[in-house]
Image (cartoon, rainbow, N blue to C red):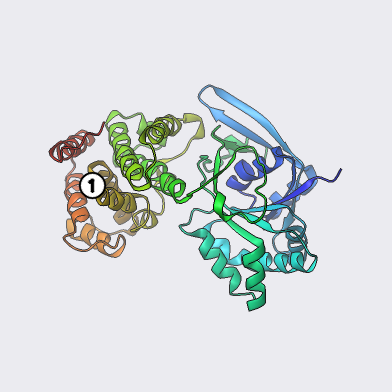
Amino acid sequence: MTMKQAVMYGGGNIGRGFIGALFSRAGYQVTFVDVAAPVVDELQSRRCYPLRIVSAEGNTDLKIENVTAVNGNDVEAVASTIAGCEIMATAVGARILKFIVPNIVAGLRKRWAEGGKPLNIIICENLNDANKIIEGMIKEQLTAEECAKFDETVGLVEASIGRMVPVQTDEMKDGEPLRVCVESYGFLPVDKAAFKGEIPEVAGMVPFEPFDFFVKRKLFIHNMGHATTAYLGGLIGLEYVWQAIDNADIRVIAQNAMTESAIALSRHYNVPLDGILLHITDLLGRFGNKALGDTCARVGGDPARKLAKADRLIGSSLMALEEGITPAYIAVGAAAGIKRYLDEAGEAQSVAAAEKVLAEVSGLESGSKLAGLILPYYKMIIEGCTLEALRRAAGALKASSLEKVI
């Protein structure tokens, strides 16, 4: 019996460490598409790769089988693979998407010419509105007739990637170049409404509608809490995220920041709060997974993106304000993020510089309520105040606003 075919565009940490493994364990023959020749060659030769689930309690090693690969520079091979698959996913990084679109277009054209079934592409990119952006890129290369065919037969399905997969060190690879070390969390929420035709059954894949709630939950709770933990850890010279979340002051600030977001999300989407709070409890434990070896430097990287108006720190704060919540603790994380941004930009730390960041990077008007919440914390940070002082200041502001938060 011929196995069902899946294409995983991107053979990196998320591709091998999460999505490709889900497809394989669901009974698919998985073809990875990548331009890293050593990865492609190894997958073609071995037809399997090792996956290690790491935790404080110990490691579990799995063998992911029924896999192969094609080189992304071989347009014909990629097109043929896409034309014959039942499901596809991308995890290449937002900046690489434009380079893979021509291959996807070639694959779709071949698929249509051969009378293939509808194709659902799971979009696993850390990018707001990734489905709309990719759709625009693809349609730029299609005729009007092909655009109509695309709308009928191609589902661009956004996914929320919750599994934490750190940069793989030589120690983690442990002599196996293809090994990926990941945490045990393995759920993949996807946009139920975006599928075309029958939704495939993949263990761990959770179709949900309205999906925007899951997108915002990931961004405004998981990503925001993770970044806040990393930026505060950086303030006191901690290397690892697990060290940061083990600090009592950081843990209180991060947990309360996530709770502020949780209340706002609950109100905005009319979703029960208790489930979101349980998710926060789970996340705090996962942040403390020492075996992942995730660093504050990596998690806090690209602060310009993390401080953008619609992203984790500013976006969650604005939703909180919209829902009548004072984001006292989220603002602490944003202030620490501004310091990281200015440090990386090689600019002197000053309130005036922070105001400029909030205006130019975060899109906040001078004198806005949110800027007024963030800047006092930033001033405390550059004046050398302790984390305890920041925590107490946030607590005092929360108490003055008469909101009941942890």
User: Quick one: SS at disc 1?
Assistant: loop
| Residue 291: percent from left, percent from top | 51, 30
Position of 394 with respect to 18 (left or right) is left
| Residue 203: percent from left, percent from top | 64, 37
Q: Is residue 302 above or below residue 240?
A: below
Question: Where the N terminus falls, by quadrant?
Answer: top right
Query: Which residue is rendered at x = 59% and y = 45% of the image?
Result: 13
Q: In this view, does 153 lie above or below 212?
A: below
Position of 119 with respect to 166 (left or right) is right
| Residue 78 vs residue 177, the one in the foreground | 78
Residue 336 seen: yes
Q: Is residue 406 above or below residue 197?
A: above
Q: What amino acid is at disc 1?
A: Gly
> Most extreme residue toward the bottom, as rendered?
144
| Residue 313: percent from left, percent from top | 33, 50
- Classify mark 1: residues with Cα within 10 Å, few (<14), some (14-19) or many (20+): few
Residue marked by disc 1: 324
> Most extreme residue toward the right, as rendered?
1
Query: Which residue is rendered at x = 59% and y = 39% of the image?
Result: 170
Query: Which residue is rendered at x = 25% and y = 63% of the image?
Result: 359
| Residue 395: percent from left, percent from top | 19, 35
